[in-house]
Amino acid sequence: MSTPRTYQTEAIVIKKTKLKEADRILTLYTPHLGKIQAVARGVRRPRSKLSGHLELITHSLVSLARGRNLDTVTGGQTITSFLTVKNDLWLTSCALYVTELVNQFTADHIENEGLFRLLLETMKQLCQAGDKELTLRYFELHLLHKVGYQPQLRKCVACRAQLKPTTNSFSPNLGGMLCPDCSPNQPTSYPVSVNAQKVLRLFQNSDDSVIDRLKIDAGLSREIESVMSRYIQYLLEREVKSAAWLDALREETRRATAG
Amino acid sequence: MNDNLTPDKDAINQLIHEFNKLPGIGPKSAQRVTYFLMRASEEEARLLAEAIFSLKQNIRLCSVCCNVTESDPCPTCRNDGRERSQICIVEQPQDILALEHTGIYKGLYHVLHGAISPTEGVGADDVRIRELLDRLQDDSVKEVILATNTTLEGEQTALYLNRLIAPLGIRVTRLARGLPFGTELEYADDVTLTRAIEGRQEF
């Protein structure tokens, strides 16, 4: 049986690259086809019927035609446009960070429906009120789980002992926490406070309704952010580009509220 | 064909190699252009070569608006007939051509040479925002019109600029975002339609 020439899928646009005069190569994240790349022709012209449905961080129903190399987008209909996110600088930046992580942690054509649902839920979370830093941390932890890098937060990854409620260390290369006895042997590990460990464990074992119930102060939020970003950077072996922009925005906001 | 991948250093191959670097020109197009030039008159080839050379020799960025120009400041910035209290912010020099073609805008411009794109590593310091803020230091500017693209990057740049400029007490406006002329409503996307409804005007 031959595969049909055209197909339709739900997708979230996670990356776009310019191609030729008016075309784009889109990177789409789909529930059943994983990450796919497709050419969208003419979408950079103002009269393109499709461009609005194929902008970054848009959840659309996309029709594609199989091509020799890349598939071509033949149709698109927005399911959710996440307008709230797009109207806000900070939320847009958060959403771009999320899409960049998904793009970096996935390979083409590998189905991961759980990750698609997580991505979609995270975008919806960003549209709602609340602490977006927590939304990002929750996303990071569950993303790592879904792509096979779930950090071990309950037992020491060296001696397997149950961790005690004290300042333990996190080792990026071992992918988990170390007890105070084992951490001196791992020079790349860094300390994590008791409260930060509690939040991380809570996130790991809860659904996303926990984000709204939790309130944490700025210092703790920064600590968790740093723990996660160092681990992510270790796994990707490179900087997450949009993280630098998030940092710049955080810094500006901090200066604005202080001054 | 050559077995090695490095092009021969003879004139034809070198020119093909150079054309091949241009956007939208693949190896076959590069060959076609090269063989066309080989058959063209010497005069034609010289004009092309001179045009390319003078592009690099004479074109620079206007010290005021960052547009590409042969004279500094550029003719638009020097033109006393233009409204000096308005600055229209665009992403690239080509956008000015499109706006000038309408003939309706009489103010000044500022070219950012890009848009903020965090995932591509383009931050606020990589586009010409500092030059813009310097221009806004004196009180002559009353309105800044954000004419960045309606892509996510353009929107984000506009939001960021608004955050920087609005506290200076300058009026910040954004080009209307709605339905393009000559299109059909049924094909419009949610974002465009939402904004078209929000931005509707008295008839």
Image (tube, coloured by chain):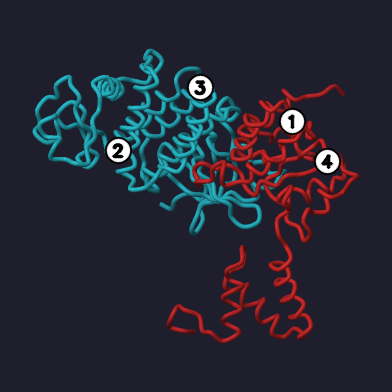
Q: Which mark is in front, 2 or 3?
A: 3
Q: Are the residues at dot 3 and dot 1 in contact (C-beta closer than 8 Å)?
A: no
Give the side of residue A246 with respect to residue A234, left or right.
right
Between marks 3 and 4 in the image, the one whose residue lies nearer the viewer? 3
Report x, y in % for residue B203. Answer: 87, 24
Chain A drawing hue: cyan
Say few, some or many: other residues with alpha carbon within 10 Å of mark 3 (under 14 / 14 to 19 / 20 or more): few
Image position of B138 (left or right of A255): right
Q: Which residue is mark 3?
A: A258
Provide the secondary structure element on which disc 3 rests: helix
Q: Is residue B40 left or right of residue A213?
A: right
**Which residue is disc 1 drawn over?**
B173
Task: Specify few, some or many for label 4: CA neighbours under 10 Å numbering under 14, 14-19, or 20 or more.
Answer: some
Q: Is residue B57 above or below residue A202?
A: below
> What residue is shown at x 57% (from left), y 73% (from top)?
B27
Secondary structure found at label 4: strand
Marked residue chain, label 4: B
Sooner in the amino-acid sequence: mark 4 or mark 1: 4
Give the amino acid at mark 4: Gly
